Image (tube, grey):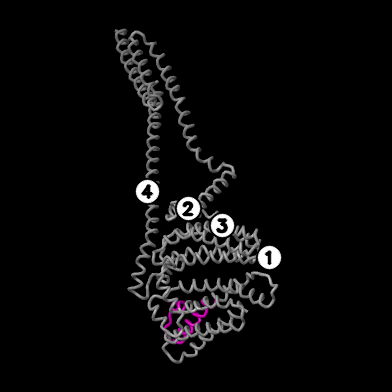
Amino acid sequence: MSHSDTIPLHPSSQSDIDEIENLINASVHQSVPSARPPSPPRASIPVSVSVSTAPSPFISSNLPPPPPLPKSSVSAVTPSPPPPRPGIATSGFGPAPNTLTEPVWDTVKRDLSRIVSNLKLVVFPNPYREDPGKALRDWDLWGPFFFIVFLGLTLSWSASVKKSEVFAVAFALLAAGAVILTLNVLLLGGHIIFFQSLSLLGYCLFPLDVGALICMLKDNVIVKVVVVCVTLAWSSWAAYPFMSSAVSPRRKALALYPVFLMYVSVGFLIIAID
Amino acid sequence: MEESSYTGLPTSHLLGSVPAVVTEENNASKHVATSANMQIFPPNNGGDRGPGYNTLGSPTEAFEQQPANNWRGVFSISSYSEYFNVDTDVVLIRLISSLNPVAGDFFSKIDANPDLYGLIWISTTLVFVLASLGNLATFLMQKHVDNSTSWSFDVSYVNVAACSIYGYAIVVPLAYYFFLQYMGSNASLIRFWCMWGYSLTIFIMSSFLLIIPVEFLRWVIILLTGVASASFVALNLRSYIEGNELSVAIIAAFFLQMALAIFIKVWFFP
């Protein structure tokens, strides 16, 4: 009887142990799928083998199966962190070094190339002249600033007396002139982007800059007049489509006249200052 | 064994639930960012359309109501666009009218639509013309006297021209506006600026004649120009002012215009 009593107790304890093992396997399965899908079937096979190979008389065989399962889970978990982390880090830091850590010369070169491309779009023939949105989409103020300062310096170098006053008049005429011309178009009911207009008017000074440089090297009055007339016509031609398309046709002359007046003033300064 | 198994299960559950919550939070934050972006775009569109609508609306309102109530602050460009509500042909008509000194109907011509375009660009043109032709005339006169004179551009002419012309065109109408307000007459500052601005047109044309290096001829030209411009101002001012007791102001306006003419002759065309 004592022997018979012990035998029924053992089967119940064995069933409890089996349930616990199943729960452990289930938890392992829950964690394993996120890490490695193929590993779950391998883990499940040993469990079934252990169940089939676990007869009631062999109690000691239950101990060996648990150790290999955690090992497999550990091996499954170990490779999971490394792969995604380097990928995230790479994508996260990818664009940052392209702009922050680039050499200064690369930045300057990119700005210079943009100025050159904008200059080509403004003062040279191209199919987008009538559309300011396409002609000067990527506008900047470095080009206009450079052209205004260059023209002021050229005129002041050409002057024999009152160099600083000549520079002040030229710079004020060009800088304030561009602002006032833009405000004039806005007040006439035109629709232009303020800084885009400043940028375009500044780029239109490029021909006059070239004319001023030539006139500084040549002292002949007739040559000066011819050069300034050509560059003046060129600057006016460059500014015409932008300004004329900004306002209604009935006010086109009102918007264009001040632009022409400014360029004539600059042209006169180039001829007169000696 | 039982204790270890119970401890492991809750841990696995917690580990399983936390990532889900984090994922939801990430999604929520993304949605918030998206809605923020959506909120940013409408104000820009509204801002872009606002000036357009205002521009379209302001002419109608200007015609309907003479005291147009479109003031949107000192720093808003659309506040001033009603004073630039003119077309090319209108400006040309006003320029031609300003050359007729005896008509005296300039205010009736501008009627309810005075502009500041004429004041600004006629003054600017006159500044440039005086600075450039003044240097040229001075050089020609010196060369007429001394044949060996070489060309020298005096850049200070630009400063003197700008200060004198802009100062005159802004201050004199302003002074008359306050004087007439003080005397009880109804005055419009914009109309005064418009009239005085267009009165400078004749000086631009006469400057080209003043290049001729003959002293006597220069005086004749500037006096004729001065009388014509002064008459234009005085007669229009008389038609604008109703009372006869303000004839002193009209005479003062006449002589102020003559003073400007003489100053131009003496300083820029000696």
Badge 4 element? helix
Is disc 4 on the same chain as disc 3? no
Please determine whether, in this image, residue B147 is positioned above or below residue B219: above
Residue underneath mark 1: A160
User: Which numbered disc covers residue B35?
Assistant: 4
Residue underneath mark 3: A145
Q: What distance separates the C-alpha of mark 3 from that of mark 4?
A: 39 Å
Badge 2 element? loop
Mark 3: few/some/many CA within 10 Å (<14, 14-19, 20+): some
Q: Residue at x 57, y 78 (%)?
A: B210
Q: Amino acid at mark 1?
A: Ser
Answer with left or right where residue B187 lies relative to residue A99: left
Q: Amino acid at mark 3?
A: Phe
Look at the image and give the residue range highlighted in magenta.
B167-194
Badge 3 element? helix
Check residue B168 for magenta coloring.
yes
Q: Chain of mark 4?
A: B
Q: Chain of mark 1?
A: A
Mark 4: few/some/many CA within 10 Å (<14, 14-19, 20+): few
